[in-house]
Every structure is written in structure tokens, then in C-alpha cells.
Amino acid sequence: MTSQQPLTAALLLLSALYAAQAAPTPPPVLPTPVSLPHLGVPFGPSDQSLQRCVAYDEFVSNAVMTYAVSYLGDNTAENAQPISAKDLRPFTPAQLFDQLYQGEASSINFKKTLIALKYAGACEPKEVWADREQLRRNVYTYAKAESYAIARSSFGELMLLVASDFVPAADSPDWIRFRCMPRNSVDLAQIAISIELSRLRNEIGEIRFGSFLDLTSGTTLAFAIDDTGSMSGEIKAAKQRVELITDQLKNSINRPHEYVLVPFNDPFIYDITHTRDSEEFKQALRRLYAHGGGDAPEMCLTGIKWAIQKSRPGSTIYVITDNDAKDYKLQNLVVAQAQHKQIAIVFLLTDELKVCGMSFYYHGDQLICRKLYEYIAEKTGGKVLVVRKDQIFRATEVIKTGLVQGLVPIRRETLFASKNDPYGFPFAVDPSIKELVIEASGSCGSLQFQNHLQKHTPIEKYGQTLSTSFLVKGGQYGQWRISGANSTSKIACETEVSARTSFGFVVTTFVKKLNNQNDCYKILNGQPTNQDAVAFYVDFYGEQNLNARTSGDRISKIRFVNELGDDVMPPHMIRHHHGDVTEKIHFESGLPAGLDPFYLVAEGRLGGIRFSRYSTYKFTTTSMEISTNIADVTIRPGLESEFTCSVTNRGDKKIKVAFDVSAKTGTILYEEDFTPTILVGKTREIPIKIKLDSKVQVGTSIKITISTKDVDSEASQYHVIEAIVGQNERPKMESLTIHTIITTRFAETKVTMKVRNDKRVAREAEVEIMLPGEAFIMNLTMLVGNDVMIGSVEEKRKAKRIYNKAKSLNFGAGHVAVRDKSSQVYKTKLLVPPFQTATFELSYQQLLRRENGLYEYMVFIDPKQPVRDLRVDVHIQEESVLNFVRVPGYESKRTYRNIRNVNKILNKYPSASPDMTYSEDRRKCHVFYAPTLSAQAAHSPLGLSGIFTVQFDVERRQVFGESFVSDGFFTHFFSAPAYVVAPPKMVTFIIDTSSSMLGHKLKQVKLALKQTLKSFDSQDYVNLVLMNDDPRPVFDDVMMQATPGNLRRAMEIVEELEAEGGTNFEIAFDVAFENLMPYMSFSDNSVSMDDPGAGADIAAPVEGTYDRHAKMIVFLTDGKPTVGQTDTNEILQNINLMNVERVNVHAIGFGNLPDMGFLDKLALENGGMAKRIFEDLDAASQIKNFFGDVIRPLMSDVNVEFEKGKVHDVTVQHFDNIYDGKEIVVSGRFTNKNSKSTIVKTKVTGKTATDYIEFDFEIDQSKVPKHLLMSTHKLELFSENMWAYLQIKDLLDQSVVVDDPDIKKEIEEAALTLSLAHNFVTPLTSMVVTRDEDRATIDRELLIEDMEADVAEEEVFEVEEPAMELDDVFSRTLGIDHTSSLPGSEELYGMYGKVDDSDVYATATMSMPITTTTFGFHADRLRGDGGFDGGWLYGDPHFVIPIQDDFNLCFTWDGQGDEVYNILYDSDRDISINAVMTTAHENDFDRNGSFVSAISFVLKRKNFVMIVHPNNITLERYDLTRKSVTFPVYYDFTEFIGNGVVLRVTDVHPSSANVKITIDQMDFQVVLRRDWKHYTTHLDFSIGRDVAQLTDSHYDGLIGQFVNADIKIDEPQIVDETEQSHVVINGRSGTVRKWHARNPAISMKTIVPCWTSEAQELTHFTHENYLVDTLLATPKYPNAL
């Protein structure tokens, strides 16, 4: 398989080596179930059959176990140890957990996963099996929704189908009857299972996959807590207990795997916390507080229901409350949901709930009050603890005991005794037990336990509950006892002893209807009825604990025991059972009538001591049967769906049924308080409606729980449904045509398909196009109804936003994007309106690379249904004569079934064979493939799914290669001449042998390695580095010559390789280079052997010359580094330092997990090639082919040179190597295609094993191949597109290698520009298709979103750094390099009389991050807003100056536009504050007024200027350098600039912002007014009162002259109804009138009294004296006053 094959993630979903087989009878039908086993008679294989086959449960266990070990090699579990696969003997879950957790954890959860997988599909084939791809998608959907139970069941069904593919017809009897697989099929079948697991893992991610397998060691710590006002003490106790638990168990095996907190009251359930982070959980608890209340009861059961939904199966939920439940009607649903997930519910009650009264236990037919809680606890295996409020903290100790991992009941007993009677019972402690937990409740008196040495320990009491835990140490095994005495009351004490143990069992219950020969056993959903045949399958785990030889250990019987410990049925006796096989107990006639609820109890001997293990679940029968028809109903988002629930009475008397329904998602509608009476043998049908929100995605998993209870007998039943939201059938594909034109190896493929939506809602048709790894999509067109939509290529994130917005608006749209660079899977989604046909046309281009001496064109066909009109049309046209064209045939990928002779299909259906026609000159060939419906169905009921391949090559008549010229572009193809022989080689293989390689991956690599080693001859040298956590070479300190004997030895070593440990990349390369180093010939500029920097570890050279040997390292891994250095950038740097002689490094990423970005860069930086090979049945062949390609370089250091000045924009011209069977391609543009001289002299040079060779030739730009350009199947602009294609590829490769982020960004922008210009979908772009009118709406919506986002981005984070000098500000301010002025700064800052900040604002906005940097920190300089009342100006502009406490002077200053005035001048400090005026715009209320549009702070002595505009601030040097920085004001920040200058921006809004400036001890404030829609954009200005308090300063300026002024005020007089006065200020007198003004420093609504005057009366100088030339100028006032 060549590199052109689409080894993609989507192809992986269908990949297999063998073609599919099904009965070739149209129309397509589901294969008959003869090849599928079922449990119609659920018996295991006989000993005789086991000699020729492997039991299916063993097969499943081995396959999944192997993959689990591989997964754990990449994902070490918490508290776990590294795995040594070779030490897993026996290969069982218990042994895995024993090694993983050092014997401290139980494998019960993982065992349950294996059981769910192996028993799935335990009845007749399901309808969904006809669509295996849909079954896969269901699995992925369930797992992504974390509905792991149904995900496991569905995946088990898929596993059964996959295993069936490998069972030959001759072996089907054993398979059908016993689920027994032929031994010679097991290896391939296990690889196929691993492939399916890899697909699942890739789809759902590492964390979910770990949860799917359930490889963790902890459980859920879940609380439902009443947070009403009376619960303060209880909440505090819970907080304290959780703090203790999480701290104590932080590194313990009992550490909870996840945490759930559900606070409840009436009527709210809110702030639900579900997390794996203990700190996050503790924070949620800390936020919890008691509040409200007084209106009991509370929503307790709703809180419990939410906790059940969030908790893992097998968990315990702790409910803390002091009140009864308002939502008591949910009791049956709560019980049903808890029983389904085997969750125990424990109530901690701090009140007897006496408000209910002793006689009030029911409300109608429903239990209430404490009886309700007792009922729920009893049904779920929990308990009710009633304690005083002052005991609550001690009572919460039971929570810790409930978290013990792997806890299994070993004895249950109800104790009865009269006053003063002794009571108790013995129990056995066997050697597998690590810890004991003893709990008792009821009237228990005082209890104690005694160990095997009869040492007594009291059991602590909390209210009516007793609980303790005890670690069992080695040797403390034998008979223990619980006892009580001296009771003063009657004893009725329910007691349970549980143990943390690695040995136990899991029960799976199957049922089928009695007297129904056609029925088969199904896994129980709910409770068995009295009309069901029942089978209990008992699977043991930890069976390695049983030692039959030395201790006579065995499992002797299974008992059926009630609550009192009495047998309700005779025990099931077991012979010769050691836990390694499933024990099957059948009740073919059903369970006996009238049975008490019972537990299954396994008994026997372990370590020579008797043991017992109880089931966690209590079994009972019921007379009610529930079924639904939901499988026939499609549940759709936004619509109401209806299904029918049928309840049948299978008992011998009529029943009155209480009925409840609940859904995890959506609203359930049914007749509440509905209690129908159902007669014997009758069925009552109840309609149920479910309505989902329109935002619920198609494919979402929903869970519906239905529960019933007989009101009279309290017998109950439940039924749980998992359903997927969405369509129940695929949109019909009416046609699929693939038209391809290949011109000079450049192929353009056009895929056209028609899809019909015959439903009444818009449906998203998803199409995955699997392309060769180097293909670029260049067009997407959709025809929906009468609308033609042509795709446009956009930047990737923009395209995704456009498509998502189209979906949200219910517009027809399409989207194409690269899902993964290495896989090249293009997924296209079509939103097809109701009752419409959509035509989809996708075009892509690719350059066919020569591999293994030929060109290979592949197209993947997977319509997922037979298509009436399916055609593949391939036109090949070359300038050279076609050497050959062949069509290997269609390789089906639908199933794994092995067809030994695919030609049977081709012979049966001739239309399945492709037609091939040559032109007379053999330069053209037409391949046509059009399989009929019958031929498609012969491959699979779902039609074709696989690869159609066309291979060809051309005659090579010139040793210098072949050139093609068109439209001013050229492309040159060159292969090493046929006479060149490969040099001898020196190869070090670095092979990943970590535990993640366990199983088929290592087997396949070993096979590929051995086949590759066979190709070595005696001139070659080889070594292998085995990479795990301690990499080592196979041959120490030497490259082994490839003699026959040495190769045999190497292959023997390879065969013995085992997977173990972690993955250490760096040391593996260190070992590889160290082995190669002695064979290097160092040049003068290489690392010196004596160079201390090179280190003393460089080995001495060996004798002999090895210059002719091609030296290389071939690296293979299936994951990422896990040991030693794990930073891949550091690893790459170290490899480059080690690779002093530039050894070629090639890399294979095996599977989905390797970091292909790292491997690509590794190869590109070291002259090698990288490739991902997915897990597949033929992966060994793919690996071998890659090895074979890279170890045969024919030429090295190859250069293609062109005559100077004749060409430009040439693609890569230097190549490290040309490999056997491959070619290089160079493309470019002619400098002047109209030049008189059309000849371009060209030269190819390079090295072979023995010589330096050079080829001189000419490219004639006028030599255009007319037969290609005039062809009816010519490609438009294909020569230019080929050049652009190669340029983009080269740029993308460069971006991988470059580390500098600026250079990388520049390269990617160049690639993006080319991609957009040529309409290519690349890793940087996506294509989106919408109607023109829809696009306008979408763009408008997105613009609004962007504007809203801009407004929202006002938060800022301050980062404290050391104070800096002013000289450093411009290179550090806001994280931008501001060492030069911005464009246009000369105009802005040269005159300053005219200020237009719009351009600067736009420029700065484009480059500014939403962050800031704080230089230094001086808290005493950060003043509040109340200090800015030393004087101010505002509006148009009004000046207000407080001269003394009871006198504010105010005046208006009229300035002309663009005039600059000095408003404050401190001559002592040489500080000037200037303001520029601007005239009012036409919207303002005063069109004749003027406003301040800019204010400058000129600090000459600090060599610093700050200029504030309404939208931005500029910092500038005062000296001649004029270095400056301008940035927008659209977020809060603080700048400690240094030299006593601080800038603080606060309260930023679109219409305003506050700028506070501190200069030494003076504070100033500028308020930015920028709501231009309502008034002229302007600035308000204030000075701090501390400015006036600086008595050592003298100020001038419009405001400054009045600071600290001398004033004399006469008594006010009333003149013309206005209060007036005469004042003398600084020696100038005038008349002032009583008026009012505003203070913008506080609020524009703040009114202050003032005395207004004509400004010229009281100012020191004339109007002109305050004018300055520019914002940077210093005023020149007259000397004297």
C-alpha cells in the first residue's frame, strides 16, 4: 500500500484487509443469522469442542485486556504503577489490577466491562446490525454522552459481528451453538477488535475511553444536601468531613474517582457540581451555605435523582436533610434509576421527622416522611441514619468507609434477641481480604467484633447506626465474630460485613419468556417476572487467589439467601470449579412462586479458609411486565414524539398500578396520578409524549426511565430505555459520479452526488470524503432546489463561524475542512431543506507521486447504501507514452470477512469489472467503472465501501527527466536513472517496545522488521534500539554487519521482543547516534572529538571507510514520550545537536496517538520522511513498504538549477535523497514568456554511491503539448495550479520546521494567501457554501456578535513587575515593541494644532492584545476619585476652580478650532499641560461652541510627553528621537511608567473612560467623552486637591493661575434678581454672579455652586498669552505681575 492510499481516520472506521462477503442475491438483505451465535440455549462449549476452538468469552477477555494494557502504556492511571506485560501471568483483569495497583485495588469494574461486552447481542440479530457503520456511530454517540452502559452493550454487538467475519462456514456449528471461535481465526479477529477499539478511542478521546473500559480504581463521592436555613450545622459537618476525606485519601487507592454535589431546597435544584478535581469539589462545598427555609418540606427526591444521573454505577449517594420530601411522588423513579445503576442511597437525618406524626406514613398511595426514606434505602441497599445535630460530624465517618475501593459484602445477618440475651454471628476472613467494613442499623444495642485471636474491639455508634473499618494485616485470617450483650431492649439489628478484596463475582441475569420456543435469552432490564425463564451467569474475578494444589481451594456452591440469612431455595452445587469459567444457573421453568427477595452467595475455600461472597444486588420477581414501541419512533429536536408503554399483569390477581416516567433530557408528558387497575393476563397501554428542546443535537443519547408499583403489594417493576435523538434512516442518495482527469500526473477529481430529503424538517446529510494525503479541495458547489450555491474558501475559523451561523438560522449550507493534517479526511455537511433534493459537487486536485515505480490513483467510495447511478470515470493523458495502465480491482472495506476469491463477484456481475480503453498513440487511457445495484449489494447490503485504484507509469526516455510547459509555468519530473544502484546502507531501527505496543501492533512490527531484514546483504550494517523506559541496543556498541548468520540472530531477537514499560524518546536517539558515531567521517566543521562541548561520550572511530554507506535512523512509535524528557521541542533540539553528520531520520507514527506534528518536524529537520500508518489488518505490509522505501536511497544531495534570470518563484530545488522508485518534482514560472529566447538552460546534479553526476538540458517554454491542451478532457489552469499546489506544500513544510513564531506566522500567511488565491482548502482554510442572500444575513449577524464581543472585552489583568526606567517604557509598554514611531506620526505629532486620531486608533487596535503590564507598584499613589476637586474644565469648555472652601470660580473659555492653550504650567518642575480645541459638530446642542479634543502632559525634565485623545493615548520622548507609542483605550489598565509617572485607565465603556495621571506628587484626571452620536467627542479635565496643597510651587495657565490664589470677596448684593459680588483675585478685580456648575470627576449629575465671571476680567494675561504653538510647546508668560 503506497503513500497515496487514503490512510485516514475515516478510512480507519471501515478498514480491513479482506473484502466483504454476503449472499449475492439482490435486493440487499441482512445476512442470515446462521453465522451469528445467540443464547437460545445458553450453554458453554464442551471439552471436545474447546480442543478445536476458543470460547468467545475468553477471546473477548484477551482482546480487550491486550488493548487495555496498551492503553495504560500511554495513560498511567492515578495511584498506578507501570505495567510489565510479560509479568501478566495469568492474563486476567485481576492480575492486571494486582500489578497496576500493587494488590490494593479490585478489578470488579473492569470485569463488569468485559462481561457487558461478551454478553452483548445475546439474542437474535438486531435490525441495526444491517448498518454496521450506523452501529459504530451509535457507540461513539453513547460514549461521548458518557452513557457508558449502553455504549458497552452496543460495542459488544459490534464485536460479535466482527468476530463472525472470521468464522468459516465449516466451523459455524460450534460458533452458533457455543460461541466458540476456530483457533486459526483468533489472531486476525483480535487485530480487528483492536482496530475497532482504536477507532472508538480516536473518536471519544483518552479520558472517555478510559471510562468506557472502566480501568479506574475509585468510585463517586456524591452528596445531595438540603441547604435550607436549619441545615447550618449539617452543612458545616459535611464540609469538614470532605476536607478530611480528600486530604487523607489524596494518594490512596480509595481516593474518589469523581465528585458530585447537588444542593436542594424548595423549589430549587441549582449549582450542581460534577468534577474529578477534589479542589473544585471542596470549593463548591465551601460556597454552600444554609439559607431560606420555613416552608418545609423540600425537593429531596429531585436532588437524589440528579445525583443518580451524575454518579457512576455502584456508587453510594449520601443524602443529608432534616425534613421530609415535597416531591415524594418521584419515589418509584428514584428507586428504579438507583437499582438500574446499582447505586445505594444513604440518608443522614438529623431530625426524627416527627412533623409527620407516628401514623402518617402515606399520602394517598405514596409513602412519605421517614418511611419513604427507609423504603428507598431498603430498595437500593442503603440505610437510614438518624442522629442528633450535635452528632452529625461523627456520623459522617460512614462516608469514608463507603469509599473503600472494591468493597464486597461477605456476610449479611439480621440479629434478634430479647433483653439480656447474647447475640452475634461468625464470619470468615480469607487471605484475599485487605480491609473490613462493619455496619449495623436498627435496635442493635452495643456491638463489638473479635478477630481470629479473639481480641475484642467495640463498634462505634452514631445515633441508631454503628460503623467501623479495620485494616486486615497478613496472618489475621480465620474465623472472626460479631457479638452483643447486656442489651436493655429488644434487638432487631440489620448487620452487614463488607471487605475490600481482590476476589469476588459479578452476576448477569438473562430472561426469556416461558412457553415460547422462538424466544431467546436477553439481558434483564428491570426485574424478572413470574413468567420468565431465568439464567444467572456468575463470573468470578481474582481467581488467581485460589490455589487448588496446595490449599484445596475451590468454589463449592452458590446459595440463594434472604435478608435473615436463610436459604430460599436449595443451593446450586459446583464441582471442580476454580473461578476460571462462567458458572451458569438456569431456571428453565422460572423462579419458584412466593420467593422472598434473595442474594446470591458464593461459598468455598480460599487459602485453606472458608469464604463467602454476597451479590450486591437483591433479586426478586414481580407480576408486572413493561414494554414499549420506542424503537419504531423517531425522536426529533424541537418536535413532540409519542410512543406507547405497555404494562401487562402476569400475576394471579388484579393489580392497581402507580405509574411514573422520567427522562434525563427533555420534557415527558403523560397522565399523572394515573393508577389503572389491570386484570389478570391483561395489558394496559399508556401513551407517552416526549418533547426535546430544538437545540438538542441529532445523535444525543437520552435515557427514559419507566417505573410501576402495585399499590397493594408494593411489588415494583422498572424499564430503562436509551434512545438516540435523530433520524432513523439515511437520506436517499440518488446518484454518485466520480469524474477524474489526470494530466501529467496532476489529477483533478470531481465528486457529484444527489441526496433526497423526504422528511418535513431540514436534515443534515454528512458526507465524508477520504482523500490522498496530499490532496487539496478547490471547489464545492451545491444545488438545493433551484438555488445554486458556489463555495468560497475562507480562513478556517471564519469559515466555521459562517457555517455554524447558517445552521443556527436553518439555512442550507455546506462546509469542507481538513479534520486532521495527516489523515486528510474532508467532512462535508449538507443541510438539506424539507422535501428537497440537494446536488453536491466537490472537486479536488492532487499531484500523484511516483512510488515503487508507478503512479497510483485511488478514490474511496462509501455511499453507505446501494446507489442506482454509480459511476467512476478516469481519463489519463500524458505527454509521454503510457508504459502500462492497470486496475487492481475494487478493495471492499465494509466488513472483515475473508473472500479468498473476489473474482467470484466480478464473474457473477460483469458490470462490476472496469472497462479500459487506450488512444492510438497510447498517451491517453479511459477507465470506466459502473457497478449495478446487484453488484454493489454483492459486496454488502450497504453497498460499496472501499478503494477503487488505477495504476500507471510512463516511458522514460531521457535520463534528465521530463518537463512540462503551459501558460508561463513549467514543471520538471526527475527520477534516478535506471543504471544507478543503491549504495550499501547502515540502518538503526528505533522500535517502540513499550507496554502500549502490546498485542497485534508489536506482532505486526516484528513481522515487518523480519521481512525488511531479509532484504539486507553482506555490505549492509544494522542495529536495533528497543525503546521503552530504558532504551538499549540489540547489539552493544556496534553496528552489526548483515551476514546471513547475524541476520538470523537479529530476527530471532526480534521474534522474542516483548512490550513493557514506558517510552523514552531522547535516550533512544542518544543510543542510536552513539552506535552510529564510530562510523562517521567528521568534516572540519563537524564536532571535534576533542571538543569539550561535544562531550566525552563520542565513541572512537572504527577501522575502515564507511563513506559510501547511506546512514539513517528509522524511528517507529505508537504514542508520545512518557519517560525522561517529554517536551518534544527539547527532544528535537537535542536530536539536532546529536545529529552532527546529518544522518537521515525517518519516522512512522503507528496508530492514532503519535504526535505527527513532532514526527513531521523530526523528519523534515533531518532529511527524512514521516508517515502515519493506522492500525489495520495489513499494517505489517504498510510498515514493510515504508521501511523498503526509505532504506534504498539512489541519489543524495540532489539540486535542480535554472539559468539565471529566466525563471522565478521556483519551488524547492534541493533534495536530500531520491529513493528507489520515486521521483522529485520542481515547478516555477518563466520570467518573461514573451522573450525572444524561449530556452532555459537547466542542470540536475547529485551524488550516487560511487560518483557525482550532472545532467545538462534545456526547457523550451514555447514547447507546449498541443495534444493535451486541445483534449476534450483538459484541465483549466492546471499548470498554474500544480505550481501553486507545490508552493503551498513547501510553505506548509517550512512552517513545521521553523521555531520563530514571527517567521512561522509570515510563512503561514504566505501559504494562506496562495490558498485563498487559488481556492484551495488546506490546513489553513476551509470552504463554506451559502446562498448569496443568506450570506449577507450571516455576515450581518456575525458583525453584531463581533461588536458585542468587543464591548465585553473590557476586563484586564495586572501583572506586577519591577519598576523600570523611562528609557525602557517604549520597548515594554503593553507587550509591544515601540522603538519606532507609528506610520503617520509625523503628521499627527508634528504640528499638533490639528489632531485626527482615527487612523492611529485603527492601526493600534489591530495589533493590541487585551492585556497590560504594570511597571512597579506604589499603592500610595493610587488615589480614589474623590480627590479630583482642585480645579477642572468640562464640556464646551466650562472652567471651575475652588479658590477657597466656600468659593468656586467658574468661567467659559471660547477658543477656535485647532487652537492650543496652556491650562497649567509649573515652572519649578518644568511641567506644561496643554489642550487643543475643536469646534462642535452639527449634532451638538451648541454648534458655535468649542471643546477640548486633546490634552498633553509635557515633562521636559523627564524627557517625556503624554498626549490623551478621546480614543487613545500616546507616550513620546521629548528629545529629538521622537520615539513614541500609541495605543487605544478600550480596556482598564495601569502603567507604572517610572520616574514618578503613573497612568491608570478605569471605567472604560464605549462612550467614556477615566484616565488618571500621577506625576510625582500631583494627580490629574481626564474623562474621555466619545459618544459622538449625541455630542462632540471631547475631554473633561480635573486636577487633584493635592496639587493645590503643594505650597512650594507656583502655577500659571488657565487653571493653574487660580490655584493657591489670593482672594478678597465683598458681601453679595441682589441685582436684577441675581446674586452678585465684587472680588479681587491675585490683584485683578471683577464682578461675579451666583451660578452653578458640574463636577465630572464625580459625575455629570453632580451640581456644585459657583461664581461666574467673564474670563478676561480675572485672568492674569490676555487671551493670546495662553496660546501655544503645539501640544509639545512650553508657554512664555510675561514676567511680571
Image (cartoon, grey):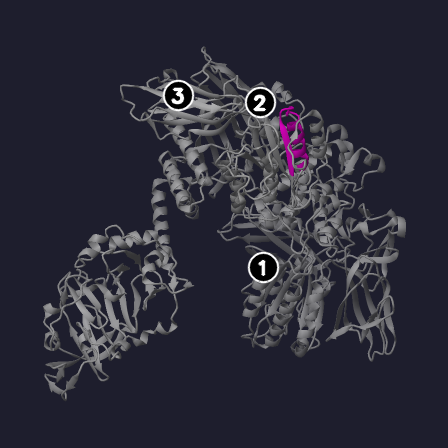
Q: Earlier in the sequence, mark 3 or mark 2?
A: 2
List the residue tagged with mark 1. 275
* Rendered image quadrant of residue 226: bottom right
Q: Earlier in the sequence, mark 2 or mark 1?
A: 1
Residue 565, percent across and down? 84, 63
Q: 10 Å neighbourhood of mark 2: few (<14), some, or many (≥20)?
A: some
Q: Indicate the amino acid at tag 2.
A: Gly
Q: CA distance from mark 2 to mark 1?
A: 52 Å
Q: Earlier in the sequence, mark 3 or mark 1?
A: 1
Question: Are circles 2 and 1 on residues that touch, CB within 8 Å?
Answer: no
- Nearer to us in this view, 869 or 1375: 1375
Number of disc labels: 3
Residue 840 visible in this rendered orientation of the protein: no
Q: Which residues are magenta?
A: 1002-1025
Q: 10 Å neighbourhood of mark 1: few (<14), some, or many (≥20)?
A: some
Q: CA distance from mark 3 to mark 1?
A: 62 Å
Q: Indicate the amino acid at tag 1.
A: Thr
Q: Residue at x 52, y 39 (%)?
A: 1087
* Rendered image quadrant of residue 1333: top left
Q: Quarter holding the N terminus?
A: top right
The kind of secondary structure element at disc 1 is strand
Q: Which of pointers 3 and 2 indicates the residue nearer the eye?
A: 3
Q: Does 751 sit left or right of 535 as displayed?
A: left
List the residue tagged with mark 3. 964
List the residue tagged with mark 2. 889
